Image (cartoon, helix red, strand yellow):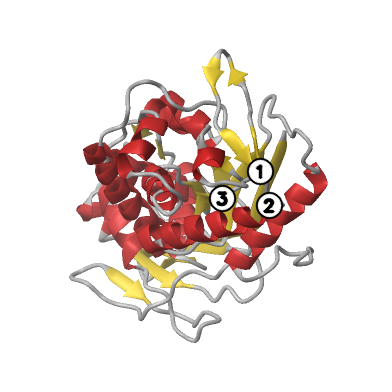
Amino acid sequence: MLSTTVHALATPQSSTGSVSGSFRTAAGPTTDGGQAFDSAPAREALVRLIGSDRARQVTLRAFERSDGPDRFEVAAEDGRLVVSGTSPAAQLTGFGWYLRHVAHADVAINGTQLNLPAVLPLPDQPIRHGSSVDHRFALNDTNQGYAGAYLSWPEWQRRIDVLALHGINEVLVYEGQEAVYQRTLEKFGYSAQDARAWIPQPAHQSWWLLQNMCCGGAPISQQLIDQRVGLAQKMTRRLRSLGMTPVMPGYFGTVPTDFEQRNLGANTVPQGTWNQLERSDWLDPTDPLFAQVAATFYRVQSELFGDSTMYKMDLLHEGGKAGTVDVAEASRAVQRLTVRRCGTPPPGQNAL
């Protein structure tokens, strides 16, 4: 198995600071883009997590991130709790630290303990922490299949809030990718119905995206594809609003088993079966047609969900067959196209 994650971290999306109602938001110093980011997404998350009465007691301020790590500060000022951070997500991480270490409470994905007094306790002295790592990534490829295939938007909204509260800044988003593949295949000889026959139901899509299985005999409905596009759009918008990165599936050559018949001359490698389930074929990344398919895939993905700076993919996962393809050259071809999509090589790497 070859696993590839291509990234080029961006600073949080910026907009002007704001004050809404009785909640206090201070714009603070500017980010690299010259504007203070908006703390409103973090403030709204606090309301969802601890209720409006307690959220009103928290002032959020923006820190300049510059080229350093994410950081936060928790302090008392004029009888109020003040949480500062380098992004809305970092502000939530600071509040999460405060909850656990000062208020002795916690909010987790699977449970909550919020036995808080009506007036939030204040720290005795300022608490300052910076991240020791830049990339704080959440969710396994199979998370959707095992535990998240049919999560609703309210459930995902809470999950994103909690991930930010615990320091995560990069989240894998597999939802909605059915539409990306469907619309891509329509440019290469397939109808929408043909594509639906190849795409499995959500509980199996993790393994479909890993190129382990396809064609389950129960085509996904167009209604469900469209619903999941709407869900993924909400997820990616929320992640970006918090200064978090949606990690999207990249393209590494997954195609239906009859792709070569519909695109004569394409060099595809049959992948056989995985646990007695039919696998998709692998389009040789060194084949000139691969670049066309990948370009279409990324264009459609961007149109639906916006651009990302991180993409997740696994070549030849769990018994994948390379055939006569040069694996090193294939890996470089995938990397080149993905880096080109990001626009900037990953830190410490050349553009190949």
Upstream in sequence: badge 3 or badge 2: 3
The answer for how far apart the CA atoms under marks 3 and 2 are is 17 Å
From the image, tell me which residue sits under label 2: 287
Query: How packed is label 1: few (under 14 Cα within 10 Å), some, or many (20 or more)?
Result: many
Can residue 245 be seen here? The reply is: no
Q: Amino acid at mark 3?
A: Gly
Q: Quadrant of residue 24?
A: bottom left
Numbered disc 1: secondary structure = loop
Q: Quadrant of the N terminus?
A: top right
Nearer the observer, 12 or 234: 234
Nearer the observer, 66 or 126: 66
Give me the disc on residue 310. Answer: none
Q: Which one is in front in this view, the residue at disc 3 or the one at disc 2?
A: 2
219 vs 185: above or below: above
Q: Residue at x 33, y 54 (%)?
A: 233
Q: Position of residue 232 (x, y in %)?
A: 35, 49
Q: Residue at x 49, y 43 (%)?
A: 262
Q: Quadrant of residue 60?
A: bottom left
From the image, tell me which residue sits under label 1: 267
Q: Residue at x 70, y 66 (%)?
A: 345
Asked whether the residues under the numbered discs 1 and 3 touch, taking CB atoms below 8 Å apart as contact, a structural biologist would say no
Q: Quadrant of residue 32?
A: bottom right
Asked whether the residues under the numbered discs 1 and 2 touch, taking CB atoms below 8 Å apart as contact, a structural biologist would say yes
The answer for how far apart the CA atoms under marks 1 and 3 are is 20 Å
Q: Position of residue 313 (x, y in %)?
A: 61, 44
240 vs 265: above or below: below
Q: Amino acid at mark 1?
A: Asn
115 lies left or right of 185: left
Q: Position of residue 350 (x, y in %)?
A: 79, 66
The answer for how far apart the CA atoms under marks 1 and 2 are is 6 Å
From the image, tell me which residue sits under label 3: 250
